[in-house]
Image (cartoon, rainbow, N blue to C red):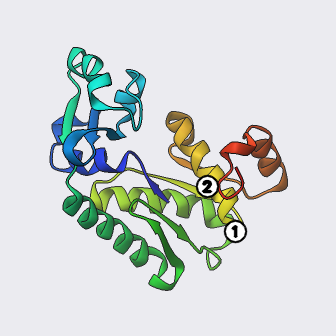
Amino acid sequence: VDCNSFYCSCERVFRPDLQNKPVVVLSNNDGCIVSRSDEAKKLGVQMAGPYFMAKHIIEKNNVSVFSSNYHLYGDMSMRVMDTLRALVGKENVEVYSVDEAFLNLDKISFEYLEQFAHEIKETVELWTGISVSVGVAPTKTLAKIANHIAKKDKAKTKCVTLLINEEEVRVALQQTRVSGIWGVG
C-alpha cells in the first residue's frame, strides 16, 4: 500500500477545496519540490526540481504551494499505518516508509483478494482522507511493480492492481525496465 502524492494528500485533508487542483510541497527552506499532485505533474512540474525553476509554471497555473510540515505528515502516516493494522492485524503490517507499507495477506482467501484490496483502499481513504494505491503480488518486488501499474493509470485500475498469476506477472515484467524494478534496478 503506497500513499498517492503523500505530502500533497496530507495538505488536501485540511484543504478539501484543493481536490483535483495542482498542489506542490517544498523541502526544508522551500528549496526543492518534494511532492506534487497528479495535476501538478501534468503541468510539467518536476519532482526534486528546484522551486525557482518551476516557479513560472506554478504561478502561471495557480498551483497551490506548501512548505513542508513534517509533524503533520508523521501524524497522518501514523493514522494510515494504524488503519492498515486495524484491517490486517499489526503483525501483518511492515512499515516501509512514511507513506508505504507491505501487508501480509496470506490469511485472505485467493478469490477474495481483489475485493479485499479495494476494501483496503476505500477504508484508508475514508478513515484518513489519504488517497492510496494497492499492489498485490506474491513477493514484495512484484507488489511494488503492481503498485506502480496501479498508480500509472488510476482511471483504469481504480488504484488497485493484482499480479497473482503467471501471465499477469510475465506481462508486467515485460513492460517494466530493469532499472525500474525495486531491489534490482
What's the amino acid at mark 2?
Answer: Lys
Task: Classify residue 103 by image quadrant.
Answer: bottom right
Mark 2 residue crowding within 10 angstroms, few (<14) / some (14–19) / many (20+): many
Residue at image location 35% in from the left, 37% down from the top? 36
Distance from disc 2 to disc 1, alpha carbons, whole Å, reads 19 Å
Q: Is residue 86 visible in the rendered structure shown here?
A: yes
| Residue 110 tag number | 1
Residue at image location 84% in from the left, 55% down from the top? 166
Between 179 and 162, the one nearer to me in the picture: 179
Residue 135 in the image: state x and y as whole percent: 59, 55
Residue at image location 47% in from the left, 56% down from the top? 2
Tag 2 near tag 1, CB within 8 Å: no
Secondary structure type for disc 1: helix
| Residue 144 tag number | 2
Secondary structure type for disc 2: helix
Mark 1 residue crowding within 10 angstroms, few (<14) / some (14–19) / many (20+): few
124 horizontally vs 118: left or right: left
Q: Is residue 67 visible in the rendered structure shown here?
A: no
Q: Which tag is nearer the camera, tag 2 or tag 1?
A: 2
